[in-house]
């Protein structure tokens, strides 16, 4: 083996060593890119999970807001205002009729410092019908309650029946 044979062997080993070094370098670069891409993927996946959780919370808040608005509307409807005073008077008249009472609404006051309107009402009927009227008014859709009650009993001259005559101050909460 001469010098040219040794150079050929050195050249082959040098080319093989260079190929191995290039392969190792390419593998290192590939591993670095894969690890970086995996890290980016995990970060983006985490961001997606956070955004999905925020979206879910937002949808839940939206549903809760809708429920709160609906409840607020129901609560608002249970108060008296200038637009529905007549509806409340009709409610009292219908309740009196349904409970077997005669009703005469004497006056309606302006809203007081407590945020309520007072209705002076004269009611005539039997004791059970009077109690039913009070109970139905307290359980009606409007927030109302008797604040003052003056009851007198008399005998009806035509029917000779004992009848109650009550003068009530009914307060209805107003907005």
Image: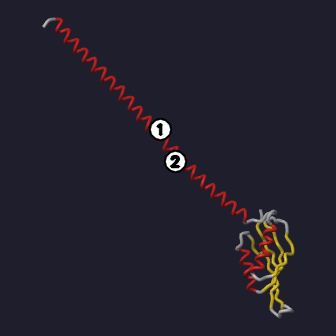
Element type at marker 1?
A: helix
- Quarter of the image for the C terminus: give it: bottom right
Q: Which residue is mark 2?
A: 53
Residue 8 in the image: above or below residue 48: above
Q: Position of residue 46 (x, y in %)?
A: 47, 41
Is 91 positioned to the left or the right of 106 in the image?
Answer: left
Q: Residue 11 is drawn in which quadrant? A: top left
Q: Residue at image x 81%, y 64%?
A: 113
Residue 44 badge: 1
Give the CA distance from mark 1 to mark 2.
14 Å
Mark with earlier residue (1, 2): 1
Q: Position of residue 76 (x, y in %)?
A: 72, 62
Seen as rendered, the residue at the extreme bottom is 160
Q: Position of residue 158 (x, y in %)?
A: 86, 92
Mark 2 crowdedness (10 Å alpha carbons): few <14, some 14-19, many ≥20: few
Q: Residue 146 is drawn in which quadrant? A: bottom right
Q: Position of residue 55 (x, y in %)?
A: 55, 47
Is 99 positioned to the left or the right of 10 in the image?
Answer: right
Seen as rendered, the residue at the extreme left is 1
Q: Pointers 1 and 2 in contact (CB under 8 A)?
A: no
Residue 99 badge: none
Q: Residue at image x 75%, y 79%?
A: 98
Residue 48 in the image: above or below residue 106: above
Mark 1 crowdedness (10 Å alpha carbons): few <14, some 14-19, many ≥20: few
Q: Residue at image x 82%, y 84%?
A: 165
**Colour scheme employed for the rendering of this structure:** secondary structure
Q: Residue at image x 76%, y 67%?
A: 173
């Amino acid at each position: 083996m001469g010098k040219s044979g040794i150079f050929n062997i050195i050249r082959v080993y040098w080319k093989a060593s260079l190929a191995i070094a290039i392969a190792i370098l390419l593998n290192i670069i590939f591993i670095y890119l894969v690890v970086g891409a995996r890290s980016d993927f995990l970060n983006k996946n985490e961001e997606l999970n956070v955004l999905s959780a925020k979206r879910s919370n937002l949808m839940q808040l939206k549903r809760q807001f809708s429920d709160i608005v609906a409840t607020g509307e129901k609560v608002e409807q249970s108060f008296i205002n200038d637009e529905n005073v007549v509806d409340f008077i009709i409610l009292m008249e219908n309740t009196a009729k349904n409970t077997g009472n005669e009703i005469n609404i004497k006056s309606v006051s302006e809203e007081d410092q407590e945020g309520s309107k007072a209705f002076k009402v004269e009611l005539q009927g039997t004791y059970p019908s009077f109690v039913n009227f009070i109970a139905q008014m307290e359980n009606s859709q409007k927030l109302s309650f008797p604040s003052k009650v003056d009851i007198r009993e008399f005998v009806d001259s035509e029917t000779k029946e004992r009848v109650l005559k009550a003068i009530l101050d009914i307060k209805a909460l107003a907005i």
